[in-house]
Amino acid sequence: MKNRESQVMDLLIGGIYIKIKSNNSYFLRKTADEFKSFVLENKTSDYFLIEVIDDYIPKEIDAISVKRKDSVFKAQADEFIASIDLGKKIAKVHVADLAGVFNCFLRVFYSIVLLDNNGFLVHAAGLSFQGKGYVFSGASESGKTTTARMAQDCKVFSDELVLIRQINKHNFIYSTPFHGEFEGDILSDCVDLEALAFLSKDIPRGYKRLSKIEIFTSLMVNIFFFSWDDESNQKLINLVSCIGESQSGYKVDLFNYDIRRVINGISKNNNSQ
Amino acid sequence: MESVKTIIRNNKAAWQQVEDNVIVVTSQTRKMHILEGVGGRIWQLLENPMSRNELIEKIQIEYDAPPWQIQEDIDNFLKELSEKLIIKING
């Protein structure tokens, strides 16, 4: 049963406040439940409004496409079509009434909005250990979910997409509701980023420090990014360069080495530099 | 290639210097290209459009290699950059 009167709910992901408006109360309840750790209670006046209309008929599309004209982005995938105006901070999305579609849209939405907020989403497992953030990045099947599952005594920030932002020259990692098959709870959180790690195999001692260019290229290929216009490209590579310059990076082998041992090794290595 | 008049960077391409390398991303190819060493230096020199011969002269001053080798390498490199839409060759 759908209530046609518009209602709103508020989420805070990566320090960016969004207000979701829909006339489908069931959709909002379902979304509030899915994103429960990220529902915002202390609301502010600075938000991005997303109007959700559940009338989209799925279409087969090769890949997610994003096109830009000035500050307006048009995004299209199999199960949604959206217009995102960064200038006015308003988005309108037509979604198919299927499970997971709004989550999929939000990933694309954040990949666009974050670029204007010195941030990006990266394919990674994110962990917080003793108040410090570690990103374990890698492609599909590289072991991100396994890393999250192995990480005892750590808070898990995601096993699929982690959010990184640079604020006042400090790098932060934020948890996200964009996760894979990890079964545990992921709570809204943010910590200083201690190291970027890239999942690999056959690394002696379990970790190997990377050069700046290796950090840059490893990070670039793992960023969740669809907006290939020149302005967005320039913003992204400037940001990745800034983060790569200021952050240590490692190739890590968690197949053959214990995760706590690798984290301790990285931490010691960082302190000795 | 000797008749080439002017070599021009794709000024719309996004780029960034990282250590001795230049990273170039073009919206047309949607790919990240890494120009290492001399390649990165050629990109820097092309900040202002110049002829093939001017470019070869400048590289000959900076790098120790036989002139024929430099000419051959630069011609191959420029062809590759042009195919990847990183530069435009007029003439």
Image (spheres, rainbow, N blue to C red):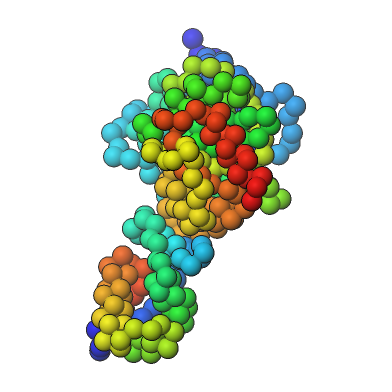
Frontmost residue, A146 versus B54? A146
Question: Residue sitting at 54 percent across and 42 percent down?
Answer: A196
Residue A225 point in image, percent of width and height: 45, 45
Frontmost residue, A99 versus A72? A99
Residue A164 point in image, percent of width and height: 58, 41
Residue A211 point in image, percent of width and height: 50, 55
Residue B79 found in image quarter: bottom left
Question: Residue sitting at 49 percent across and 16 percent down?
Answer: A183
A56 w.r.t. A172: above or below: above
Question: Residue sitting at 38 percent across and 37 percent down?
Answer: A201
Frontmost residue, B3 versus B34? B34
Q: Residue furthest top?
A: A1
Task: Tell me, yes or no, if residue A8 can be seen here.
Answer: no
Residue A233 point in image, percent of width and height: 47, 56
Question: Residue sitting at 67 percent across and 29 percent down?
Answer: A130
B43 displayed left or right of B29:
right
A53 w.r.t. A83: above or below: above
Indicate the quadrant containing the C terminus of chain B: top left, top right, bottom left or bottom right.
bottom left
Indicate the quadrant containing the N terminus of chain B: top left, top right, bottom left or bottom right.
bottom left
Task: Tell me, yes or no, if residue A214 can be seen here.
Answer: yes
Residue A190 found in image quarter: top right
